[in-house]
Amino acid sequence: MPSLDRRRFLRDTAATTALVTTGGLAAGAATPAHAATPTATPTPTARRKGAVSFRWWGTAGWRVDIADRTVLVDPFLSRIDTGLFTGAFKTDTKLTVRADVIDPRVENATTVLVTHTHWDHFMDVPHIAKRTGARVFGTLTACHLGLAYGVPSTQLSPVKGGEVLDFGDHTVEVVGSLHSRNPSYSLAFPGVRVSQPAQPATIADLPEGDTLGYLLRVDGGPSVYFTGASDVAERNLTGLSPDVAMVALQNATTTGDYLPRLLAGLDYPKVVVPVHFDNFETALQNPPPVAPTDRTRLNDMIAAVRRISPRSRVLVPEYETAYHF
């Protein structure tokens, strides 16, 4: 396989730990508006109580706590070393799930949303699903891969875009999306799984499998759009108008007008949160490690957001910090 930039097959880019407003860039750790507080467990007829918290787990991964429910998006905590950030990328790297890292952070989960099935988005999902009983939503490829790992079919829900799923105190709208392209107008590990395969052994056994976005709307709380890759099918965004957008950073210029089309399609969110900018093959410790070229890309992205959507606030997150929108 020819040598490639770390982002040529994934997508995204650079970072600093900063909080950016339309008034300027403040260097330093991003700070949540207020600390997370315990919430009471509601009765079956109770409305949601307490603040909704969003915690970034690196790459495009998030933990969202809504009362007694935990929603995970692309949870990838094992952060195995593939050589991607050292220039010696090994496509035959074995998939090694780090239960010692995952289990203390995922004591329970009710829902897992998978944007696509590259290893840095999907690899830990089967372990989490089997351990917690969480329901997994994703493409047909995600469901077939889940079966290959022994996840019960009763926990797997295939979606393709357009579905609006009602969970009582929140809804999830599934949005058809696209994976980013590298400078050669291609991507690594393309393909889908149209039937249950053998259990994957290496990162190359987890293809992209088509890409989705998710809009989470919390009753009495924020609406948040999650991306996992830096391309956009903007016609699918009509009417979403989220308060917050978790935006994967672009690594190449092969996707034309990515940010202008994305931000316009989302009706210029109040808050833009860059994701997938960190070195996700290191321990989950603050400050998030960032390659020099990725840092440059993030700075360029921040400047572009301020130009395209000057009323948006840009929040560059730190790991495992509770944010309330």
Image: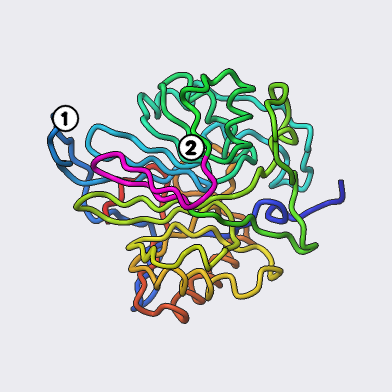
Instruction: State whether residue 210 is above or below residue 93.
Output: below
Secondary structure under the numbered disc 1 in the rendered image: loop
- For residue 49, above or below residue 180: above
Residue beneath label 1, please? 44
Residue 325 position, x and y percent, is 27, 56
Does the magenta run of residues contain 171?
yes
Q: Residue at x 59, y 32 (%)?
A: 123
Other-residue count near label 1 (Cα within 10 Å), few / some / many at <14 / 14–19 / ≥20:
few
The residue at which mark 2 appears reads as: 137
Structural crowding at the residue carrying mark 2, measured as other residues with C-alpha within 10 Å and reported as few (<14), some (14–19) or many (≥20): many
| Magenta highlight on residue 294 | no
Quadrant for residue 183, please give it.
bottom right
| Mark 1–mark 2 distance (CA, rounded to whole Å) | 23 Å
Residue at screen point 40% across, 24% down: 104
What amino acid type is highlighted by mark number 1? Pro
Quarter where residue 270 is shown: bottom left
Percent across and percent down for residue 89 are 77, 42
In the rendered view, tell whether residue 19 sits above or below residue 45. Answer: below
Q: Given the image, on which type of amino acid does mark 2 rest?
A: Phe
> Mark 1 touching mark 2, by CB under 8 A?
no
Residue under the point 37% across and 68% down: 269
Q: How is the image coloured?
A: rainbow
| Residue 233, x across and y down, in percent | 57, 64
Using the image as rendered, state which of residue 293 and residue 133 is in the foreground.
Answer: 133
Relative height, residue 111 to residue 217 (above, below):
above
Relative horizontal placement of residue 106, taking residue 81 as reference (left or right): left
Residue 119 percent across, percent down from the top left: 64, 37
